[in-house]
Amino acid sequence: MSDLYSRHRRVMPDWLALYYDDPIEITHGEGRHVWDSDGNRYLDFFGGILTTMTAHALPEVTKAVGEQAGRILHSSTLYLNRPMVELAERIAQVSGIPDARVFFTTSGTEANDTALLLATTYRRTNTVLAMRNSYHGRSFSTVGITGNRSWSPTSLSPLQTLYVHGGVRTRGPFAHLDDRAFTDACVADLRDVLGHTRPPAALIAEPVQGVGGFTSPPDGLYADFHEVLKERGILWISDEVQTGWGRTGDHFWGWGAHAASGPPDIVTFAKGIGNGASIGGVIARAELMNCLDANSISTFGGTQLTMAAGLANLTYLLDHDLQGNARRVGGLLIERLRAVAAQLPGVREVRGRGLMIGIELAKPGTDEADPQAASAVLEAARTGGLLIGKGGGHDTSALRVAPPLSLTVAEAEEGAAILEDALRSAYS
């Protein structure tokens, strides 16, 4: 046990999870690679939980942060803030929401917390619809709507939450149906739930469920949900903390796969926009954003340093078409991993889109989750020089693959080869 690990255990909570039997300290990174304190080099296919979105030590971001740090780090939202306004203008422009207003926070948890405050205030009800297998953060309110037992330590909540089907395509009572019948069954379930409860404030949903193992419904399901919600004045909150900014390749926002009935009422974001800087936020049309009747501020949300990072990062992403790169390179990576999976009885499914790929593992010959294999693959990949994540929900085990969006074809091939060896070692 390293000295740093011993110190960590003495002062940090027992529930603060660490990867690996022998946890590593990452000391620096460049491009799609990071190094640990022992000098080992890794290809990074997890990006600090989908947060290093463009690249490690991206010169455009480090330059913007350094220049801003030389001027002023922080002043709070009580004063005009040019970088905050400029980033809000860019985000409003690409949001797809008419007359958009943007409020910055420091995390995805806080962004979802704010979205719930807006929705429940606007609708004057504390009932919320959420998806099974979902994850929305670690605050008291967001834990209360999280539909994933592994990440929900308490049943106490300021909200009444009702869970509906649809976030997981290949498990559950509708898994045997084709896409159209699956969607129709989920819509019928939603209508049934609404008949048994007081009118909810909103449905909150991740277009691709992150912690749940990168699961998603058929394209168009949330558009059909939206039509039912609009009939009753219920809001749609799209949690884009992991899916936003072009990661899925096909769309800039995850909700783009469900756009037939128009944009969501509220979008939350975080993680990748700051490329490591602590940025979260909420986008909503003015009518919703302005519904609060009391003063509010954000001491650290929108601080100059993080806004400079976010603006430089978003500019780089758009100027270099990283969404297109995610679509092209991600497509190659998914097909490479599917070819490997076809030869391994323990791989139940390779799913995802763009550079957001889930590999679900099951005990060979069964449909039963195999968390031991997931841990073994994680360890073997690290030994081979590759960092990946893991997740899953009810009775599932999944590996999560989410490299920076500037990933090259050569790096995708290298990572796939390491991951193939790791998967084979777990089932040899």
Image (spheres, rainbow, N blue to C red):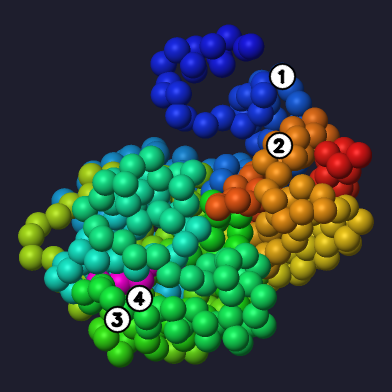
The answer to which of 394 and 62 lies nearer the viewer is: 394
Residue that mark 4 sits on: 193
Mark 1–mark 4 CB contact (< 8 Å): no
Mark 1–mark 2 CB contact (< 8 Å): no
Q: Mark 1 against mark 2, which lies toward the viewer?
A: 2
Segment colored magenta: 201-205
Circle 4 sits in a helix, a strand or a loop, which is it?
helix
At label 4, counting other C-alpha atoms closer than 10 Å, the crowd grade (few under 14, some 14-19, many 20 or more) is some
Residue that mark 3 sits on: 195
Residue type at numbered disc 3:
Gly
The answer to which of 252 and 113 lies nearer the viewer is: 113
The answer to which of 261 and 125 lies nearer the viewer is: 125
Residue that mark 1 sits on: 38
Q: Quadrant of the C terminus?
A: top right
Residue type at numbered disc 2:
Gln
Specify whether residue 359 is painted magenta. no
Label located before the other in sequence (2 or 3): 3
